[in-house]
Image (tube, rainbow, N blue to C red):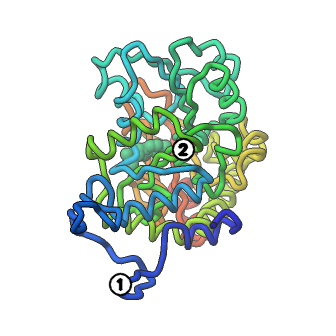
Amino acid sequence: MLDRYKIETTAVHAGRHVDPATGAVTPPIHLSTTFERGADGEYPRGYSYSREDNPNRRALEECLAALEGGKQALAFASGLAVATALVQRLEPGDHILAPDDVYYGLRKVIGEVFAKSGLEASYVDMTDLDAVRQAVRPSTRLVWVETPSNPLMTITDLAGIAGIARRANAISICDGTFATPILQRPFEQGIDMVTHSTTKYIGGHSDVVGGALITKFDNYLFERARKSQIFGGAVPSPFDCWLTLRGVDTLPYRMRAHSENAGRIAQFLEGHPAVQAVHYPGLACHAGHEIAARQMSGFGGMLSVQVPGGRAQAMQVAARVRLFTRATSLGGAHSLIEHRASVEPSKTKTPQNLLRLSIGLENAGDLIADLEQALNGNPR
Ligand SMILES: Cc1ncc(COP(=O)(O)O)c(C=O)c1O
């Protein structure tokens, strides 16, 4: 029914309905862990036990599936719980192909949590489609793509990757955390499944951890992930689901504001003498700009910047900010700054002089002034 509406309307209405018991417009939070059976022993209202399904999770899943243009969605306790559910359900000898600059947590899930599972994984530069073609094996089951990537903001051609995966009979999945369904539509590029850390823009207020898996069509990996969710128990609480769904109400408008602010800040940084490089796909000089302009409707709120020098110089800039908060994560209303190499494993590709910025919803001029004084080395 919601197919005929635009995304702002879907964001507010999908999965929601006026509460039949009270008329409440905002959905109630259903904390009950268990639900009444009918006299015949059935569950006439569709719920039995809250790990298996509950009204707040169902509402969130319906909304996320509609937003992404997918068939079904599963809500998980975190973004990495989605990765765990998928990887856990592969079989010994199965091969996963992922980007060489993938969010480092996926490498940890594959290499540490499932170190003894007999899975094979290779990491390639996914901006190079020939390299991806060569890396695919007959045993490849999952081709994982992340665009824009974290933290170098590289852009991968989603249609190109989807085609390679399809020809290899593998399932393609896009981590769309940085872009959200507002700015990027992986299913329209032929990708099979989408995952998000809803902890970030979808929740949008830095107050709830969560993850989602959305599929465009029925497939065995999605069904196995559903079993991990329901029987493995990696479920978000009703309150987590409620908070995340509340975040979705404003997602389309927030993403536009994040993108606008980040675009202005990227332009300011590009011309600044105390900056060596700016990584933002909205800048014409960015290596992935053309592809990003084709497959994204806005360039998002994330960017990274390299300053002349090394780790110490980057740390000094981060130490001088006043409005930005030195913290990990992204996607909330507060602007954050992070020396990314410090939190990643020692073999990281992330340059030591790089700072990652999550541009929030403050006034862009105020954020620019803050970065200006931090880059110029003004005393506090
Ligand atoms: C791109 C990306 N994917 C996945 C995750 C993992 O999400 P979570 O922290 O919700 O487990 C993160 C977290 O930073 C991320 O940035």
Location of the N terminus (image quadrant): bottom right
In the image, residue 174 sits, relative to residue 316, either above or below, namely above
Q: Position of residue 28 (x, y in %)?
A: 35, 77
Residue 21 is labelled as: 1
Residue projecting furthest to the bottom: 23
Residue visible at 41% across and 34% down in the picture: 86
Q: Position of residue 161 (x, y in %)?
A: 66, 29
Observer-nearest residue: 266 or 195? 195
Q: Amino acid at mark 2?
A: Thr
Residue 380 visible in rendering:
no
Q: How many marks?
A: 2
Q: Badge 1: how crowded within 10 Å, few (<14), some, or many (20+)?
A: few
Q: Position of residue 24 (x, y in %)?
A: 40, 85
Residue visible at 47% across and 34% down in the picture: 352
Judging by the rendered image, the residue that carries numbered circle 2 is 215
- Work out how far the residue at label 1 is from the one at label 2, CA to CA, in angstroms: 32 Å
Q: Report ligand 1 position as a quadrant.
A: top left
Relative horizontal placement of residue 32, taking residue 257 as reference (left or right): left
